Image (cartoon, helix red, strand yellow):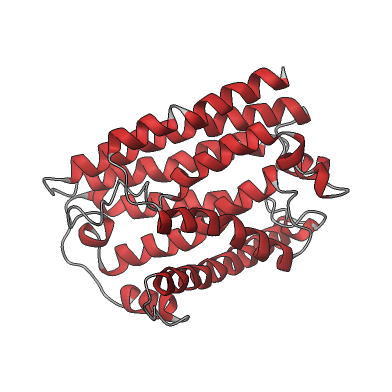
Amino acid sequence: MDLLTRVLFTLLGLFIILNWGLLMTAIMRKLTARVGKRVGIRWYQPWINLVKLYSNRNSISHGVMFQLGPVFRLLGGVGLVMFMPLIYGSELFTNFSFAGDLVIILYIKFFGMLGMALGAGEGGHPYSAIGVSRGLSQVTTVELPFTLAVIALAVQYNTLSITEIVAAQQGGILNWTLFTNPVATAAALLSMLGIFMHSPFDLHKAPNEIPIGPPTEYHSSYLGILRTNAAILHVIEAVLFMNLFFGGATSWPMLIVKTFLIYFISVFVGVVFPRFRIEQSVRWFLQVPLILGIVAIILIL
């Protein structure tokens, strides 16, 4: 397949993921509202919000890094899509995946968060440093058990290619990593709660504590970029877990169903449990998920 065709279908995949992420955001907010006996937002509200945000301009700037923070954050989400194989068996939607794509995806996952931290640090808000330290502390502890689970998978399947990992899980549901390596799967799924950053792990915004965070610091088109990235990340991170632990997807309907169910896990936990304090969150990730990650490594060696 020539480069132009690959670029066009990568952009098409990005377009589908963005719109599915916006729709899934509306569905999840609707479900959360129903739990609280509220009506919730309209299903098309995320699109209206994006149009309104991108139509506004901001004349206030705290520096170049403040402006680049949302851009770096969006590049992290777009970068994941570019190197993530979406549909197994479809050459059109393998994007720019290659033999060691799992390694670069782990790097890109952290890139957006670091860019956002640099941007927030230049915002000038007295509580910005608190939000940055909370977010980076939690992300660091989340990445430890998740990385151990990924290493266990790399040893198990003897590859760092996501496509080859998905290929090894074909042939039936019992071939999924969920069943062939349940310990690594458990470590990754518990880490996933922190990766999606829903309650009780939404420490970087602390919505019930102090009125700060990206929705306050960034507005107009800056906030539009962050909302766009959030819609992309919700889906593409669920695609990553789907590929590594749940057999991947051989069609778009299968991808939609699996990513919805994976993302719903974090939303369900967020509805049931209140928000942790930072020391509770860090301690939790360094106990159960980290121990499971270590056990997964020991069992696979």
Hey, which quadrant is residue 130 in on the image?
A: top left
Q: Residue at x 55, y 30 (%)?
A: 147
In the image, residue 280 above or below residue 223: above
- Outermost residue, left side: 126
* Residue 237: % across, % down: 55, 51
Hey, which quadrant is residue 186 in on the image?
A: top right
Q: Residue at x 29, y 37 (%)?
A: 278
Hey, which quadrant is residue 301 in on the image?
A: top right
Q: Residue at x 16, y 52 (%)?
A: 62
Left or right of residue 182, residue 57 in this image: left
Q: Residue at x 78, y 40 (%)?
A: 164
Left or right of residue 122, residue 299 in this image: right
Left or right of residue 263, residue 275 in this image: left
Most foreground residue, 157 or 145: 145
* Residue 55: % across, % down: 31, 78
- Outermost residue, right side: 171
Most foreground residue, 257 or 199: 199
Evaluate whether residue 84 shows in this view: no
* Residue 97: % across, % down: 69, 45
In the image, residue 124 above or below residue 250: above
